[in-house]
Amino acid sequence: MNNLLNELNILKNNLDKLPIKNISDLDLNRTELFIVDINNGFAKEGSLYSPRIENLISPIVEFTKSISKDVKNIIAFTDYHTFDSIELLSYPSHCIENTVECEIVDELKNIENLKIIKKNSTNGFFALEDINFENTDNIIIVGDCTDICIYQLSITLKSYFNQHNINKNIIVPINLVDTYHTDNVHPADLLNIVFFNSMIQNGIEVVKYINY
């Protein structure tokens, strides 16, 4: 048990030592922003609502507005299920088509250059209509949940690029990402530590925050 706690502290310290990224270091004309599941069903109401996700709304909206006129592309992924969706065998019913839950939050709706992509699984990669990133150098990923949709999207993107020997920079700022907490089942702080570290080990650029 002591070894386990020591290892956990080491992983936490890894995150405490993360650098800050300056937006000025990026060519925004060759940068895309992926916003994951900042929708009503996770951030405002419903069976999978979490106050931790609701707390992401304001900082993500502020960050997105600050770069929206300069960034190449902004994609907002949102869950969009039917009652027959296989994913609902694993999770409570949520974000059913044509309900308010599957809509992105109102605070994001008036941001220019934002495209909404509906997804029927936890992995937004498979909902992308275009995986040609020829004129993209950087992909910033924000939203929820750290250990599910964010992790799967970032790792799948990285694996796709590795498979095809494509060198792209995937950036995950930890102040704009979080997961839900359920006592004795889904410990959010622990899962954040573990999954952010796994992203780092897999070549994702995880940073404390992006200075803009």
Image (tube, grey):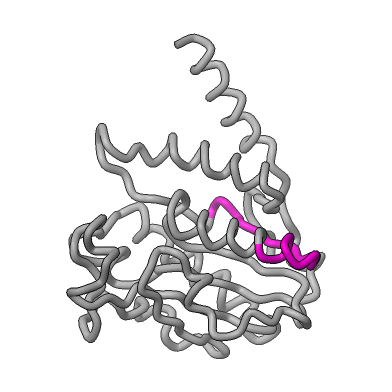
Seen from the viewer's position, the closer of residues 156 and 11 is: 156
The residue shown at (34%, 61%) is 54
Q: In which quarter of the image is the C terminus?
A: bottom right
Relative to 96, say whether 47 is above or below. Answer: above
> Horizontal and vertical percent for residue 63?
57, 69
Is residue 168 inside the magenta stretch? yes
> Horizontal and vertical percent for residue 143?
47, 62
Occupied quadrant, residue 16: top right
State which region is magenta: 160-175
Q: Please identify the residue farthest to the front as the structure is shown.
A: 163
Occupied quadrant, residue 49: bottom left
The residue shown at (22%, 76%) is 96
* In this rendering, position of residue 73 left or right of residue 8: right
Seen from the viewer's position, the closer of residues 97 and 18 is: 97
Is residue 204 inside the magenta stretch? no
> Horizontal and vertical percent for residue 66?
62, 76
Q: In which quarter of the image is the N terminus?
A: top left
